[in-house]
Each structure stands twice: as structure tokens, then as C-alpha cells.
């Protein structure tokens, strides 16, 4: 499915990733969506090495399940993933220089990453991955995760009050059962366009956010009995 075909030479990576992905927002479908977005963004960027970008996209969340299943919250799937990917690609006989560029993209793809993406391929992966958190897909993803975590559908509370109550200093939600997609939107998702690198992703992000603003407005009206 999708506009951009994945070359057969990546079948071994696809099979491997399919087994290792996490649930809901970070399942294999997320990888396929990020691939479509990355190829779309790459069309407008100069000197993109697809031999770096494609493996980086396919493998970027390979350690996400380890992070999701770590009760201590200390696993950083971007850093752990980069190490895992190094080993996987070495076993598959990839060139060392290529491996180091792919690892670099994966290490810097995280939302709260310490090291920002620097290469064109790393910036595209970062932007494509963030675009998948917003728009209609972003709403659907929020509710897939929210259902799993026992979140509320909608919480009508001023953001400052909510933050004082339920957001820790590190930005983590203290009690997920008192979280909701509209608050996630207010806290994080609506700021995504400011964090992107490529012009094409920024434009797309604005469109996706417009849709989210309308969605949450209508949702509130329906809940309030106004429509
Ligand atoms: Fe990730
Ligand atoms: Fe991702």
C-alpha cells in the first residue's frame, strides 16, 4: 500500500522489523507510513542518499518495544536502536561507512533527543516520524494508545492547571489515566511544526494541525451537547 514502493532488496530488513515492532502507535504500520512520508519529503531535498535513508527509516523504531516494556523508563529506544542496527547491518554485510550514517540517523530521531539530526537523511527521518504523530493519523494513534493506557476521551481543564497536576518536571505524564488526547495536543503536538527541519514537512505539518484544531473543537462541542 502507498504511493512509494519498497524495493525487494529490503525484504530481509522488512521481515526482521515486522517481528520486532511494538504495539499501537509504534507498530509495523507506523514504519510503513514513515517510509511513505520520508520518500515524499526526499523528493524536495538535495543530495539525499536513499541507501542511508531507507534502512534508517525501516529500522528506526526497532528498539521501541524494549523502551515500552521497560518499567524503569530508562531505555532510550533511539540510542539502543542505533546499537542494535549496527550489529544487524554488520551481519548482513553492509558497508561500515553506510552503517555509521544509518546509525547516526536512528540515534537522532527521538522527540526529546540530546543530539539533533544533522545529515539530510537524519532530518528527513526526524520530520517524517514527527508528521506521523499529527493529522488524522495523529488523532487515531492518540486514541489507540489512550485506549491501551486507560486515558479519558476528553478533559476540559486549563493547560496550566493540568500541567501543575499531572506533568512531571521531565515532561512525563504522572497518571496516564488522567491524560487525554486533547491535552497531548495542547502540550506537545501543536508545537511540532516549530521543531521540523525541512520546508516541505513544515507546510504539511501546518495542514495536519489545522485538521486537528477542527477535530478537537467539534469533539468538545459534541461532548458539551452543542451539536
Ligand atoms: Fe522512535
Ligand atoms: Fe517512529
Image (cartoon, helix red, strand yellow):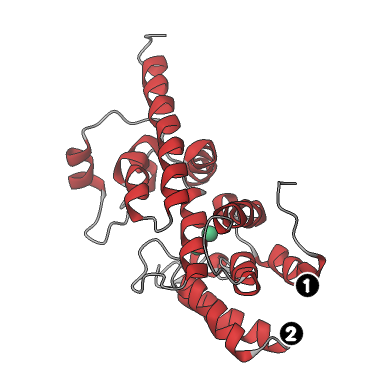
Point out the tag, 1 or 2, that comes first from the N-terminus.
Answer: 1
Q: Is residue 85 left or right of residue 112?
A: right
Residue 153 in view (yes/no): no
Position of the C terminus by quadrant: top left
Q: Which mark is residue 147?
A: none
The reply to whether discs 1 and 2 touch (Cβ–Cβ < 8 Å) is: yes
Q: Give the number of marks.
A: 2
At 17% from the left edge and 46% from the top edge, which residue is drawn?
A: 164
Residue 118 place in picture, x, y as percent:
41, 73
Residue 105 place in picture, x, y as percent:
50, 73
Neighbor class of circle 1 (other Cα within 10 Å; few <14, some 14-19, many 20+) is: few
Quarter occupied by residue 186: top left
Q: Which residue is mark 2?
A: 92
Residue 200 in view (yes/no): yes
At 52% from the left edge and 68% from the top edge, which residue is drawn?
A: 121
At 49% from the left edge and 42% from the top edge, which residue is drawn?
A: 138
Which sits in the foreground, 212 or 50?
Answer: 50
Residue placed furthest toward the right: 8
Element type where label 1 sits in the image: helix
Q: Is residue 187 left or right of residue 21?
A: left
Whole-Å distance between the Cαs marked 1 and 2?
9 Å
Quarter occupied by residue 71: bottom left
Q: Is residue 72 left or right of residue 6?
A: left
Element type where label 2 sits in the image: loop
Residue 59 place in picture, x, y as percent:
62, 69
Disc 2: residue Cβ within 8 A of ligand 2's nearest atom: no
Residue placed furthest toward the front: 46
Q: Which mark is residue 12?
A: 1
At 30% from the left edge and 45% from the top edge, which residue is drawn?
A: 187
Amino acid at each position: 500500500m502507498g504511493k512509494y514502493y519498497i524495493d525487494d532488496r529490503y525484504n530481509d530488513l522488512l521481515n526482521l522489523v515486522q517481528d520486532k515492532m511494538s504495539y499501537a502507535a509504534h507498530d509495523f504500520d507506523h514504519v510503513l507510513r514513515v517510509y511513505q512520508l520520508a520518500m515524499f519529503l526526499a523528493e524536495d531535498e538535495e543530495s539525499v542518499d536513499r541507501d542511508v535513508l531507507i534502512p534508517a527509516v525501516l529500522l528506526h523504531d526497532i528498539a521501541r518495544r524494549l523502551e515500552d516494556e521497560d518499567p524503569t523508563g530508562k531505555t532510550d529506544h533511539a540510542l539502543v536502536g542505533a546499537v542494535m542496527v549496527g550489529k544487524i547491518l554488520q551481519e548482513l554485510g553492509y558497508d561500515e561507512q553506510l552503517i555509521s550514517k544509518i546509525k547516526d540517523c536512528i540515534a537522532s530521531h527521538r522527540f526529546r533527543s540530546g543530539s539533533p539530526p544533522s545529515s539530510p537523511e537524519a532530518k528527513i527521518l526526524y520530520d517524517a516520524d514527527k508528521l506521523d504523530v499529527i493529522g488524522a493519523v495523529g488523532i487515531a494513534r492518540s486514541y489507540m494508545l489512550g485506549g491501551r493506557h486507560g486515558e479519558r476521551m476528553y478533559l476540559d481543564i486549563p493547560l496550566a492547571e493540568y500541567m501543575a497536576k499531572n506533568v512531571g518536571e521531565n515532561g512525563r505524564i504522572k497518571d496516564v489515566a488522567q491524560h487525554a488526547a486533547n491535552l497531548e495536543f495542547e502540550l506537545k503536538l501543536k508545537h511540532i511544526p516549530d521543531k521540523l527541519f525541512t520546508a516541505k514537512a513544515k507546510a504539511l505539518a501546518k495542514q495536519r494541525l489545522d485538521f486537528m484544531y477542527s477535530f478537537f473543537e467539534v469533539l468538545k462541542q459534541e461532548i458539551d451537547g452543542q451539536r
